[in-house]
Amino acid sequence: MDAGYILIDGHSSPEELIKLIAKRRADSREPLNLLNLDDVVGKHRNWQRKLPTVAPYYAVKCNSHPAVLRLLAALGCGFDCASRTELETIVAMGVAPERVVFANPAKPVEALLYARRVGVKRMTFDSADELEKIAQHYPEAEALLRIRHDAREAQLSLGRKFGCDPDREAVALLACAKELNVRVIGVSFHVGSGSTDAECFYAGIRRVMDIFDKGERMGTHMHLLDIGGGFPGANGRQFDEHVLCISKAIAEHVVGRSRPITVIAEPGRYYVESAVTALVNVVSKAYERDASGRISRVRYYVDDGLYDSFDWCDTQSNVPVLQEDKRDAPCLRSVVYGRTVCERDVISEEIWLPEHAVGDCMVFPNKGAYGKILGTGHNGFAPASVKVCLSRATLNYLCASAVKAERG
């Protein structure tokens, strides 16, 4: 077994895992990401149980750690790739091209040619220029029209950059595709990363089905509905709200049509956010005092930050969990700064924490989405190391899948 892997009890709680890793790193003073693969397995099974009619295509951009990708491939997930590099990574793992969507509406020609070479046919577009590029360089492609459909609340809206206007542009683009002999097999949308607007999915599916009907009348017969990403990743009840809205929309607007329709999604944050816990160390601290000399705020400086394990778009959730030895201590107004000299590297702006000493560890849950992917190595700091935890059952499953893949 890889030395970077730690065997755990499959029923271990996050608190138990933190205690386990703390014991194993007693002499270490480096930042660490604890990746629990069993959490990913649990998310996949939860998806299969609650959304059995929606095939997940994991968004590689969210967290491309090899252990995550290998596990999801073994579990039978599809993949949403946004670049040639991501395509190369997934194809090298032996994933069938039918399980991949090239979900970038603005693809470089060289990436398009690579997709053609390896047989990845499904890809998105949202403009006439992109259609012309596909027609010229990959005429056998199976195109998905991406429309704009934004959630009312999301951590990161994507509609300003991608997606055509569904009312004013969709039909014209379907007509353009017909003229260019590009086969359009479906429609996609993305409500935005980290959406809290479950009802947005219902409206999006209904809107897409209206475009399906318009396409049918003009001779474009579509069969694939891609509802994109935006699913919450922390372990909570929000995902169930999304499930209710999506299931209702599929039952009312998709099921029972004359042509069978396949529904897929592009979850990223959902699969990995809760799988990673970041452990960082206090390397320095300072006090701010009011006019009477009393402490008004404590400034903590830690050995990780927004240029590595923490997501720039999700600073609201950057609150450490209190460890047992500090839960009864009085709290002070605090700010937690990241390790670079960039003034924007602020992990937590205004929070209340029991006082920590230099050398103490702070524990941040739900750090598996986007943080390390957006890390830039600012100021030359090495990235936080990753310790992969998994149960014996998950390890055996991965080993069996690898043997099966080698045998073809």
Image (cartoon, rainbow, N blue to C red):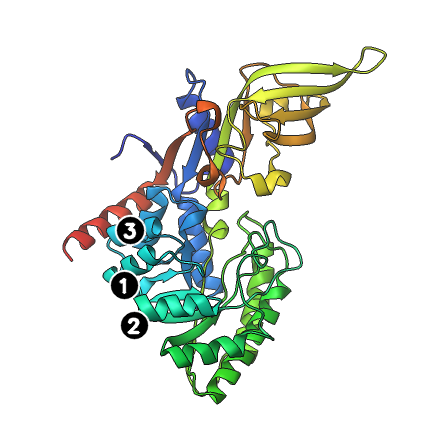
Label 3's element? Answer: helix
The residue identified by callout 3 is: 88
Q: Nearer the viewer, mark 3 or mark 2?
A: 2
**Could you tell me the amino acid type at mark 1?**
Arg
Which residue type does callout 2 highlight? Glu
Q: Which mark is residue 38?
A: none
Please identify the quarter of the rendering in which residue 67 is found. Answer: top left
391 or 216, which is in the foreground? 216
Q: Residues within 10 Å of mark 1 (few under 14, many from 20)?
A: some
Which residue position holds label 1? 116
- The numbered mark, 3 or 1, whose residue comes first in the sequence reads 3
Q: Secondary structure at mark 2?
A: loop
Looking at the figure, which quarter contains the C terminus? bottom left
Residue 32, position in %: x, y? 44, 28
Outermost residue, top side: 293
Residue displayed at 33% across by 52% down: 84
